[in-house]
Image (spheres, rainbow, N blue to C red):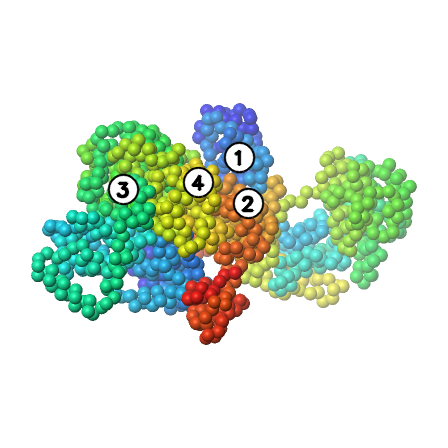
Amino acid sequence: MIKLKIDNREVKADEGSTLISVIRESGTEVPSMCYLEDLDHFTSCMVCVVKERESGKMIPSCSRKVEEGMDIITLDEEVREARKTALDLMLSEHVGDCEAPCQVTCPAHMDIPLMNRLLAQGKFREALRVVMKDIALPAVLGRICPAPCEGACRRKPMDGAVSICLLKRYAGDHDLEQETPWNTERATSTGKKVAVVGAGPAGLAAAYHLSLLGHDCVVLDRNRLAGGSMRKEVTEDQLPGEVLDREIDRIAAAGVTFRLGQEVDLKMFTGLTGQYDAVILAVGKGNSGIGDWGLPAGSRGVDADPSTYRVDDTTLFVVGSAFKPSKMAIRALGQGKEASFSVDQFLKGKKVTGEPFLFNSRFGKLLPEEYPEYLKESVPGDRIEPEQISGGFTPRQVMEEAARCLHCDCRDLNTCKLRIYSDQYGADQRRFRSEERVTCRKLDQHDVVIYEPSKCIKCGICVRITEKHSEKYGLTFIGRGFEVVVGIPFNESLGSGLQKVAVEAAEACPTGSLTLK
Amino acid sequence: MEIDLREVEGIVNELGRETEAVIPILQAIQGKYNYLPEEALRRVCEISEITPGQIVGVASFYSQFRFRPAGQHMIKVCVGTACHVKGAVQVYDAIRRELEMESTEDTTPSGKYTVEKVNCLGCCTLAPVVQIDRVTYGHVSTAQVRSILKDFESQAGAGKSKSKFRYADGSEVKGEIRIGLGSCCVASGSDEIRDAVKDTIERKSLNVKLKHVGCVGMCHQVPLVEVVPVNGESSLYSKVNAADVEQIVEQHFQPEGFLKRVSNRLLKVADTFRDDSRWEGIDRYSLDVREKHVSSFLGKQVPVATEFRGIINPIDVEEYKERHGFLGLKKALTRLSPEQVVQHIIDSGIRGRGGAGFPTGQKWKLVASAESDQKYVICNGDEGDPGAFMDRMLLESYPYRILEGMIAAGYAVGASRGILYIRAEYPLAVTRVSEAIDICREEGFLGKNILGTGFDFDLRVYQGAGAFVCGEETALMESIEGKRGFPRIRPPFPAVKGLWGKPTLINNTETFAQIAYILKNSPEQFSRIGKGASRGTKVFALAGKVARGGLIEVPMGMTIREVVEEVGGGVAGGRSFKAVQIGGPSGGCVPSWKADTPIDFESLNEVGAMMGSGGLVVLDDTDCMVDIARYFLTFTQNEACGKCSFGRIGTKRMLEILEKITSGRGEETDLENLEKLAEWTRKGSLCGLCRTAPNPILSTLMYFREEYEAHIRGECPAGRCKELIKYEITDDCIGCTLCAQECPVEAIEFKPHEKHEVKQDLCIQCDGCRQVCPEDAVIIR
């Protein structure tokens, strides 16, 4: 038995054990990417570094055996910085999107590629569910949103952006035609009460999501009809009142009560603050009079925390144009949704930190030589336009247009270690950015897996696996230094390269470079 | 090209089917076809244990291998440090322009020439050097590119006879004529000198022995001819011309017999009527060893590794034995126990000469005490520092000394097998050492029961395939095992788990070259030389802007100033001494105001430099320190293996920043970012290559920060960085039009008798005009 110290704790380990296993078994987490238990270590990624107390040297824990008397610090400022720097460096050569640019750009953060995939298959109801996770008023927004998502669409420079807005509209419209418009099951009542002042997009979204989470929400508005600027500043042609009514009805069906035609002045506001567990101000940018209410003033509106929308340590939250003036309903709506997360935290007595957004790897525009690569996962064809904008798409057009999606989102969104650790350590992809980047390629000639070399971090796991299992061609390192790539020898296809261990290699790949289709 | 697969099969049959035979097999295939045809590689995989993954992985790792056919003739432009500071980049560009090559191709459209940059041909004092096939051209300027191509084409087809070592017929010898034939000497024309001497001796029937000697070290004076009459003093002639040989020989030797003498005189008289030029002062080529510059160069040196330099024939084993060769080995094998040998090495204080300076005796002890059924000794001859050619010289000129050291080491640590890993770029070294090994076997110094002591030991040569990283000991071992040269983490150290997992002693060539001295004399004699914790001597390749460049061996502790000014003769051309770069791409620069720093491991570390393997490049005020840092980092980044994140990406990003700075696009934040990157690349890289890659940057930043800042402001004070300099013609212009004729892009209008002008928007800063101007009227602003 070997005796060593890990973070000043005495630990005993078998001779010949690897340092990283011993540390992990002792209960401390250590990140690792190029290390896989049954394979020889490779000492490549360096995220598993820990510090030797006496010498101060950083040692890669996956490649060292424990030694008698070792004294290890598993995490201090310097180790943290070392790991973060390793991640920063790897991110600088990692060319790929985690979430697709459309989703990242959408102020409501809607999972657009997933919606597209479902629509392309004709699964309209499922598609709507995806939309409503983030957008409470799909048919409405499908008519009035300026669609910043389409501006970010990678297909745009090719043959026209995917018509995301109209696709979303169809999903909304289709649902409204059903017997019962769809709603998630409401969670069990928490007994908490929330007052939302303002029935515009921000307020409606906040109330909707909070209600689904089990809180009792009441929406107050001085107008007789809910909708805020969506009612007042949009023409009937663009947004028929009936559509707005029916989607607001859906919100009511989710458990939200409305007190319309109710002006809220300072006195009433103070009352609300006393009676309700939380109050959300969503009064918009009009002359609501709240400027005289003595609320802390920010540069553009009421001063609130940008991640949580909370005003100081009070029970008050501010969203929408009252917080920061915006012309986009979708932005207000997105904030309302995000605020529901923090209000929920608050009401449940948790620390109010706001909705967490995971790290996203991003890169610039696609280059023309990359268009054919991305088209491998899509269909050719120009952007489809409807007969008349007001009519929207036909079901067949929906399926064809949705199929034009390039699926820029990474398949390993939730399992990619590079993403997870970059998030954990606060990595910065722009820190070591370069003016050049490798071109994206997609090797998809395989039944089961797909390989994107531009996402590869050269950890060599797949190389070692194919070697271990005697794949005839397998994967191998080609070239040297910065230009090294992992590829199939003799330019054979991916299918030839991975005949036996494709699944195992794809599952072992720490990034989304080699994944299951 | 038609590939006869039976030839491929023949190669595999000869070299073996095991995976570790892959590199020799690839070298043989490329030797035959000039590149690696895919079918040949596939066939190899079919008939051996080598897999496609392995063969492609290995072939694509090493620079030597090509996957596409090369041109008929290879033009290699040396971009070693000494050549770089003398303008190799401009020469390379000029050749490409002259041959009208496409920017993305390395081979001319007709397929006649392939042009490539190579790391250090080892002829630094002839910088810039260009090698076309087997012909080496020295001191090539951009203006001469056309003429060397013409010269090569006129020679092509004229086969050169293979050089052989020949002695006179053994009859009474009147003396000896010694000609240096190291690679450097040959590159400067010693071959022709030798032929001329041979011719002269034969024609005049002189009883004079012609002897080839290894490197004398005075590379700045080659070709060197030393005449040693049996009676009388020896005379040293430098920069000898083939045309002068006859006179030199005559000066010292007269042919036997009255008639011969008379006929010679008559012939001579007849000759002189035909050609006056021969009378001209051969005297000025004669050097007296007592002459100041020669004695300064040689006087302060202490030959240990280079003992008997210039005297001894590299491959003559009898001569080596006469001069105490193998004495140390005999002593060790017959009178000392292995432990005692190890102790001798410890007592001598010798430290590794490859750069890290690890106490050699300690390393030997570690290997000796490891328990195993098999141990190995490896000589690291993968000297890759651009501008360093010490090990090449040692291997070419003193092969027996190195072998002796290795055999003694084998005895001391209990190894029975040894390998000399020699760079691909040193073909002469490979041949000499292989020959020396054969002779040692015949002599009983290698093989079974050496000198009747029951000790078995044998050696073989392994040729590298072009990867600087394989100078790193763990990468070297991976290479021998037939893999990509990826370093392994240490621990475990090679002494415990090395080649094939067995305890391995791996030392640098120069280290082994010094062992014989320690054993044949005594540890104390060695440790008496030197300073502090750095005992003994060190061989340096002194090059760059120094008057007398060459290979020198000096005691540890000599100061930089002494080396540069006394041994090297100071900075050439009337320029001022700015700094020395020590330790190549892993090293640092020491500015002139710190020139009194002694050259030993500790003192150099203290000033931010590093001993390194022995490259010592002198820089003057026309050298840009930022450019030097960029030059070294370009080298290391190109040679990085790519395995670890910090090394692979860190070096690349640092280089990108440096390129920004030297091309005039630098920003304020760049220096900070550079320093941060340097700090992390040092801390996080797996092996010494990338760990020390930031050193040139950090040391130049430390001493010459203002130069970096000037570049960010858009100036290059030394006048080197192309994007930041302008070529201008002063009023000294006499209108001779040479510059206009020279300019490859017609940026100077042809105006006879008028002052010429450089059109800045067309100028490509090739330096051609400045080189041809007879009035020095072209300046760099």
- Disc 2: host chain: B
Residue depicted at x 78% and y 43%: A304
Q: Is residue A367 left or right of residue A396?
A: left
Residue depicted at x 28% and y 30%: B341
Q: How packed is label 4: few (under 14 Cα within 10 Å), some, or many (20 or more)?
A: some
Depicted B276 relative to depicted A29: above or below: below
Query: At numbered mark 3, what does the secondary structure look like: helix, strand or loop?
Result: loop
Q: How packed is label 1: few (under 14 Cα within 10 Å), some, or many (20 or more)?
A: many
Query: At numbered mark 4, what does the secondary structure look like: helix, strand or loop?
Result: loop
Looking at this view, is B58 or B43 the one in front? B58
Badges 3 and 1, same chain: no
Label 1 belongs to which residue? A50
- Distance from disc 2 to disc 3, alpha carbons, whole Å, reads 44 Å
What residue type is disc 2 on? Glu
What residue type is disc 4 on? Thr
Residue depicted at x 55% and y 59%: A370
